[in-house]
Image (cartoon, grey):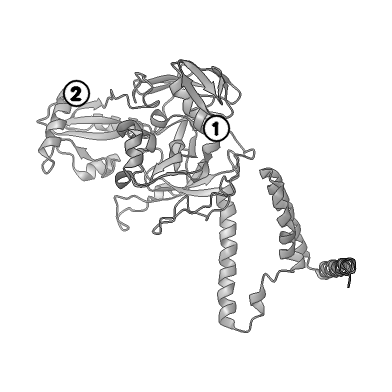
Amino acid sequence: MSVFTLIYTTKQSFKIKMKNTIIKLWNRVKEQKSGKAWFNAIVACVSYILFIVWIGNYVWLILLPIVFDVFITKIIPWTWWKKLKNKTIVSVMGWVDALLFALVAVYFINTYLFQNYQIPTSSLEKSLLVGDFLFVSKASYGPRIPNTPLSFPLVQHTFPLINTKSYIDKPHWEYKRLSGFDSIKPNDIVVFNFPAGDTVPQKVSNPDYYTLCYIYGKQFVNNRKDIFGDIIYRPVDRRENYVKRCVAIAGNWLQIKNNQVYVNGEKCINNSGIQFNYYIQTDGTLLNREFVDELGISVADDSLMIKAGQSDEINSYNANEIMKLGLNPNLPVYHFPLNEEMYNNLLKTSGITKLVIEKSNRHDVFPLGGNKSWTRDNYGPIWIPRKGAVLKLNAYNYSIYERIIRNYENNTLERRGGKFFINNKQTDVYKFKMDYYWMLGDNRHNSADSRYWGFVPEDHIVGRPVLVWLSLNKDKSWFDGKIRWNRFLKNAEE
């Protein structure tokens, strides 16, 4: 047989097989008379096509025939196990099938619609409490496509116990977001990915990597794996979830004067849950735990400054701090976070003689090393960047916006001899690609927020808490008020 004859015969054979396959598929399509199957197929295929159009990666359309096959043609024996005679295997595979379906459903719900979030720290008290479990709406501000689509549902970045990544780095999709029902407004409580969580020492999570480098030096942090562990990178959607209150949006000017927030020069109305740390002097009266609990102070925040059982060094240091405040170290002094209602209740309490707000003169705030005189209590003024706005770089604002230009908007940025180079071109003008936000905790003196790590980019926004579906008091037992029933199904933004 000649080569040409072989090629011709092979070609004809291939045509016949393709024709038979198409006829077979068409017959299966005609045989499929179930209206439910066709409805499910149409919904699934249309949804899949819309999803591909949204992410803008049309290569994934090659999988569309597989989606269709699941419902109609069924060339791939998806439910092969149902024909087995072994009832045990059929039963086990039934559970496996249900579990896989549940995981896929949870993945899409968790990624695009709702996410559960637990309040881990007191940074938003007394608005949201430690132990609150929230439903977070991702549709409110528009769901994002995941940067790392291949991930295990309900696990943010690391599997517990086995301590391995819960996601695969490739493929990596760029930031894209559908339009939401609303936009972020000042005073909204927002869940977002921690901006400074891109680089993480595995053994030390608090403070963040950049603060550690500021305190100890970058070389020391990177080289001392025995202390800090390996330094790893996390994509945006795999960074820790934080929840704070947005106090300023893109284009606003923000300033804090003596703990009071001003936006665009106007004094902001304080939410009733906002609290600050106070030193409380008594006339010798010791406040019992029952009274402090009714006041709303947790065990972790119930602090008597000088007490038996505490080291002499700590007691001596606290005594000096108490005297600096004009208080008497020989009488009981407590250190509590108080909102306005709690403050007013203490003013009316017998035995309380003085309440003095805690002050901070420390300058370890954002931008670290920026040579600003700002503190936690007196901060700014600072401008919040807006998409499309143009900034003229100078020696004063370089430290404020360099992280945005370099890390969040993926440019190279250098400063040589007083001149600025962006993407290797000399220029002192930069146009922002995203909107940014300024987030603060309501527990103002006990919150790691934008005052310490700066702006929150729009691509880090996760969603809006809409509902407290469960609240557990860590200081109570199950038979003594563990469940806060008064917070059940509470609006998370009230």
Going by the numbered disc 2, the residue's amino acid type is Leu
Query: Where residue 24 sits in the image (x, y, percent)?
Result: 83, 70
Horizontal relation, residue 391 to residue 313: left or right: right
Of 337 and 382, the residue lying toward us:
382
In the image, taking residue 171 as reference, residue 166 lies left or right, namely left
Give percent across and percent down for residue 448: 37, 35
Q: In the image, is residue 225 above or below residue 35?
A: above
Q: Is residue 450 above or below residue 430?
A: below
Residue at (60% x, 78% y) in the render? 90
Residue 475: percent from left, percent from top: 29, 50
Residue picked out by circle 1: 410
Q: Secondary structure at mark 2?
A: loop
Mark 1 element type: loop
Mark in the foreground, 2 or 1: 1
Q: Is residue 9 above or below residue 234?
A: below
- The residue most toward the front is 2
Q: Quadrant of the N terminus?
A: bottom right
**Which disc is residue 325 wearing?**
2
Name the kind of residue labelled 1 in the image.
Asn
* 69 or 35: nearer the viewer: 69
Q: Nearer the viewer, residue 234 or 54?
A: 234
Specify whether residue 356 is in view. Answer: yes
Q: Which mark is residue 166?
A: none
Marks 2 and 1, the one that precedes in the sequence: 2
